[in-house]
Amino acid sequence: MERKSWKKRITAALMAGIFAVGGSFALQPAPVADAGWGDLLGTVIGGFQAKAEAEKQIKELDQTEAGRQQLFTMFQDEYGVEEASPWEELCARAIDRVSDGIAKTDPSVRDKPFLWFINQEDSFNAFCSLGHVMSINRGLFHYLQNEDEIAVVLGHEMGHGMKSHVADGWRKQIDVAIGAQVLASITDSSALRNKVLDTVVTQINRVSIGRAHEWEADGLALRYITDAGYNPGAAAAVWQRFMEQQGDNPQNFVSEMFDPSDHPTNKERRDKYMQSVKDYSGGHVEVKDGAVYVKGKRFVEPAAIANMSGAERAYFVQGNLAAAYHNGHATESAYADGDVVMLGAQPVMSCLAGDESASALAARLNQMK
């Protein structure tokens, strides 16, 4: 077989490097026969140089305070700030608590605290971009009002930020998001910085966050909220709520975290969280078909209340029982404190209209725990 000329071999290698990056879309190179060798090599080298400069600008936006603040301001301008939001105080408290939870295992959050605001978008969404810049749609609160569940969503986005998923996603999408030809045509670093900045802000929904990163962010959210003192059962409860309102299809929510071709379904996420909380309990507590089981025995099926189904409530009961087992309270007696079932110092369930009495549930729990 005749060996390729060195020019053709180098050209093929360089073109493969340029056009292999970009997922579902790639710019098509001009046929080699139609371009001069010098022009083609110059374009390829220019593209590499431009992408190297783009990487520099991404690092500046992600890792420097000046870059973070500029990105924060641009997101506010792009999406609008919801002034005097009734959810401002709750979000501030939740983000502070989750940040404290993060710091227990990753103190670096103190060096780059999250910058956040509530925007004026009415769809369900929250996102974390480069530099720990986070925005929360006011529409999120049309679906969620419980602080523990809101902390799950925020913890998920903060997990993306702590693990630099968004920065990694933009690196993978740089050809798609900006385009190799555009990059190669920009030689001024300030112009390229502005292009990167504008693209990151206006195309947040095009960032490439894959299935593995989604599972990692889900796991981090559970760890963060648990370390922050929230109910770990809230994580599965969020997805139970979404399924009841929107079904099992990820397309039903507008969020950068959802890609129906690659991302976990709502049911997969709910069930994974339930299993994680069961593991946290030492394998003692689980939820099946809306009922809570302790050591394989049916403990309670909570009643529905005005703003929450019985199935959603069951995951909160599981979370409280899991905390009791994890923290050693299950060695103590269960008892009724008014309408609240207690296990040692751990509240398990507030008995509301339609539920069995707290005293009956405490007696049952003592027989099976």
Image (spheres, rainbow, N blue to C red):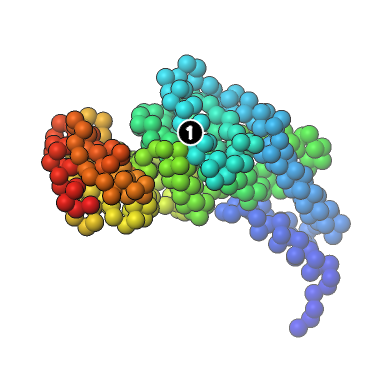
Residue 285: percent from left, percent from top: 28, 52
Residue 201: percent from left, percent from top: 61, 34
Of 123 and 309, the residue lying toward us? 309
Q: Quadrant of the N terminus?
A: bottom right
Q: Residue at x 42, y 52 (%)?
A: 264
Is residue 347 left or right of 204 when viewed as pictured? left
Of 194 and 59, the residue lying toward us? 59
Q: Residue at x 43, y 50 (%)?
A: 260
Of 252 and 313, the residue lying toward us? 313
Query: In the current view of this chain or complex, which residue is farthest to the front?
Result: 332
Residue 194: percent from left, percent from top: 72, 33
Q: Residue at x 81, y 53 (%)?
A: 45
In this rendering, does residue 254 appear at all?
Answer: no
Task: Locate residue 9: give its quadrant.
Answer: bottom right
Q: Secondary structure at mark 1?
A: helix
Q: Residue at x 61, y 36 (%)?
A: 110
Amino acid carrying label 1: it is: Arg
Is residue 134 left or right of 249 when viewed as pictured? right
Task: Locate residue 335: give its quadrant.
Answer: top left
| Vertical comparison of 138 with 11: above or below | above
Identify residue for label 1.
Answer: 97
